[in-house]
Image (cartoon, rainbow, N blue to C red):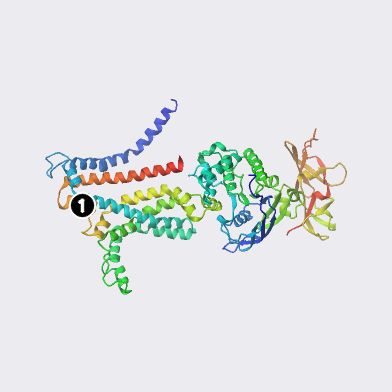
Amino acid sequence: MVDAPSGRSLVVDAVTHRYPSGALAVENINLDIKGGEIIALLGPSGCGKTTLLRIIAGFIAQTQGRIIIGDDIVDALPPNKRAVGIVFQNYALFPHLSISENVAYGLAARGIDKASRQREAQRLLELVQLPAMADRLPRQLSGGQQQRVALARALAIKPSILLLDEPFAALDKNLRLDMQIEVKRLQRVSGITTLIVTHDQEEALSMADRVAVLSHGKLEQFGSPSDVYDRPQTLFVNTFVGSTNRMPGIVVSADRTAAKVRLDAGAEIIARPAGGALSEGGRVTVCIRPEHLQFVGDETGFAGVVGMSLPLGATVVHEVTTADGSGVKVSQARIGETRALENGAAVRLAPLAPSLANAFPATL
Amino acid sequence: MGAAPAARDVTSYGMGLAAPLALFFLIFFVAPLLQLFWLSLHNDTAGLHWGLGQYLHFLTDPFSLGVLGSTLLLGAEVTAVCLVLGFPIAWLYQRVGPKLQTVIILIVLLPLLTSVVVRTFAWIVILGRQGIINATLQSLGLIDTPLKLLYTQFGVVLALAQVQMPLMTLPLITALSRIDPNLDDASCSLGAGSWRTFFRIVLPLSLPGIIAGCTLTYAAAITAFITQSLIGGGQMLFMPMYLYQQASTLQNWPFAAAISIIFLLAVLAVVSIFTTLGRMSRGYGGA
């Protein structure tokens, strides 16, 4: 796809969509996507990510806001005039058309002659590594192959934006990884601005240049995978992306960059005020990821009793019950001989660094 | 070889269950059919002389051939009208909410819930010289003399199309509901307009339903004795009435039997053309 146009930018400008019933599907979404970026729309089902995808594709007319592709406001354009390629979750290949007819379908709609169509379809099938499948029917192909065809079909129209709707959800785990690598490779080669809708955080973090996390129709955070994972801006992002321990506490003192929090589990720790300024004496929820907790030998940190240890290959996860009765998980890398922890052993835990403990104002 | 006894067991089990129905068909369908065939092989009404005379008579008689031709044509016309009117209804059904779907299904099924005789008389009221259509047109001043609608081919096709509509619409609704709605979106996102999507995607994928609907409508339309006779009146003669006249009025049983066999073969021929088309369409969707 060296001859493909380099990706165009995509701006989602204050888009709000209300269902006919009056319920909000998405509310005031702003995304500024550069040409050639891979963006993941991440969120649990029902968060509005598919609605947003359908708005960008033109299948739904948003109640408010604008969609801008490149320099063009496309709100008035129907889906067939937007040059947006879509790969559907179930691939939606035309069951009665051969693989090569499927790939060439969009070219035929553009009035390109048959010989050029076939040449282009064959070139795309080679690109997705299925050159020998041209005359087969979709149902004669495996799930992974069907997805490659769906990709080739979407790329055939040289779209300015490529939208992938839960593209790997129907594939088994090994195949999923292969296809993720494949999609990333194709995207790098073609340079097409790509939007992946997914509920799978690993997929979002591994594939995307930037991740937009949605919840209940609102944009919670839009940032690089490491921003989203390490510097979450909301409690939702912190708990939805990766796993985390939620520890309640009270703010002892706070400034813009650090807060001293007295945990209900005992001990005072320094945490990062992640969701804006904290007020002294206010209740907070401190989120610390299992891999960011460590066992400490001295009297710092908070006390706990080891309940269970799960050796998960590269890591060992310990379930520890703290003084206030809540459980926290501690994940230890298995480097050399990991110290075995007895059931019922008394331990003390502390975060690895203050920046790895995120304090959010407690919601009532 | 090891699997063969098991397979035979399953088959014989199924055959046993089908026996009552098979017996029923044998006594009340196959036997009368054979009797009919036997009857048609007599050259005289008394049944004394054997021969193919009745068939020769039918096939050399322009009047009889005309009746056969107009009956087959009637079926084709009714089928075409049902397809053209039924497809949009079935298409609409896929695109409305559940409440409207119930309404559409009710409207589609309504003809099946009333007696054919009642419906046919309703059409007489609508189409007659002093009927609803003529009265309306006259009161609007659009025509001076009543249009002749009743006892015409137009009237028969119209009434039959209404009566047979469910047979077309229901298979179409089934076929269209099997099409993944994402295919529409996929086609659209690839740059195809509604017409291209319809002719390249929706129509080919609904072909099995179209074939099924056409077969049912056609078979029902050409054998619809009551509607054909009441709307067509005495001036329009179709095969069922022709047959009835020969058997009941003229007591020419061998000729009536021969008409039946010829009619049966003609219908079978048309139905098998539809079936072949259906198989080809599945091949189109499948090969």
Q: Is residue B187 visible?
A: yes
Q: What residue do we see at 41% from left, 55% from top?
A: B87
**Residue ID for mark 1:** B242
Q: Is residue B104 left or right of residue A58?
A: left
Q: Residue furthest right?
A: A298
* Figure quadrant of residue A273: bottom right
In this rendering, does residue B257 appear at all?
A: no
Q: Which residue is located at x 54 percent, y 48 percent?
A: A107
Task: For mark 1, give the secondary structure.
Answer: helix
Q: Nearer the viewer, residue B242 or B170?
A: B242
Instruction: Give the residue type at disc 1.
Output: Tyr
Q: In this picture, is B129 found above or below B217?
A: below
Image quarter (top left, top right, bottom left or bottom right) of the C terminus of chain A: bottom right
| Total labels drawn | 1
Q: What is the quadrant of residue A54 in the picture?
A: bottom right
In the image, residue A210 lies at what x, y percent?
Answer: 71, 50
Would you say A174 lies left or right of B4 here?
right
